[in-house]
Image (tube, rainbow, N blue to C red):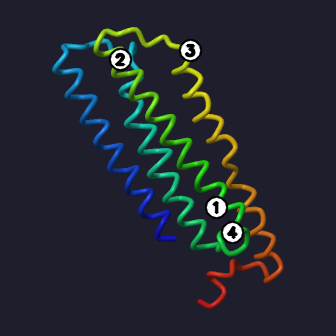
Amino acid sequence: MMRLLYTAFAFGATGVLSGLYYRELTKANDFMDRSASQLPLVHTHLLVLGFVFLLIVLALEKLFAITAAAPRAFTWFYWLWTLGVAVTGGMMLVKGTLVVLGADASSAAFAGIAGLGHISLAVAVLFVSLRAALKKAEAVGPVAPALAGR
């Protein structure tokens, strides 16, 4: 559980710093066309997909003990999700920075790598882990195992 917490807060800090980076880079280069760059979206993607979503997963772990019910599936989910958020955010950062600096950012390689990040997010199916945990909880009874002792 602590790994989820630390990863969430790492993405949270990175998300906040990416917002600062966007503000300062665009101000330094007098860049006013926000719709032309992916740079403002990096902040939101890292905060929502990396910070908020992982905090929700942490709450689900506390309620349903997902890692105990399906440890391999959850490990796959964790690493694929973390990699997907990092690659997607990183490619948005690179491409957005190039646009702000006036360089050509229309490389097929950028699109391909960003696509791999998105594929990793799609493959990171938390629901495989959650399904196993819920099946285990059904076997115990209608109350989640974490709440049964209260």
Q: Of the residues shown, which amino acid type is indicated by label 1?
A: Thr
C-alpha gap between disc 1 and disc 2? 34 Å
The C terminus - image quarter? bottom right
Q: Of the residues shown, which amino acid type is indicated by label 2?
A: Leu
C-alpha gap between disc 2 and disc 3? 14 Å
- Answer with mark 2 or mark 4, whichever residue precedes in sequence: 4
Residue behind mark 3: 108
C-alpha gap between disc 4 and disc 3? 37 Å
- Answer with mark 2 or mark 3, whichever residue precedes in sequence: 2
Residue visible at 40% across and 8% down? 104
- Answer with mark 1 or mark 2, whichever residue precedes in sequence: 1
Residue behind mark 2: 98
Q: Nearer the viewer, mark 4 or mark 3?
A: 3
Q: How far across and down, in percent of the image, does residue 101 sit?
A: 28, 14
Q: Of the residues shown, which amino acid type is indicated by label 3?
A: Ala
Crowding near the residue tagged with mark 1, few <14, some 14–19, many ≥20 C-alpha atoms within 10 Å: some
Quarter occupied by residue 114: top right
The answer to the question of whether label 4 and label 1 lie on touching residues, with beta carbons closer than 8 A, is yes
Crowding near the residue tagged with mark 4, few <14, some 14–19, many ≥20 C-alpha atoms within 10 Å: some
Residue behind mark 4: 71
C-alpha gap between disc 4 and disc 1? 6 Å
Helix, strand or loop for disc 3: helix
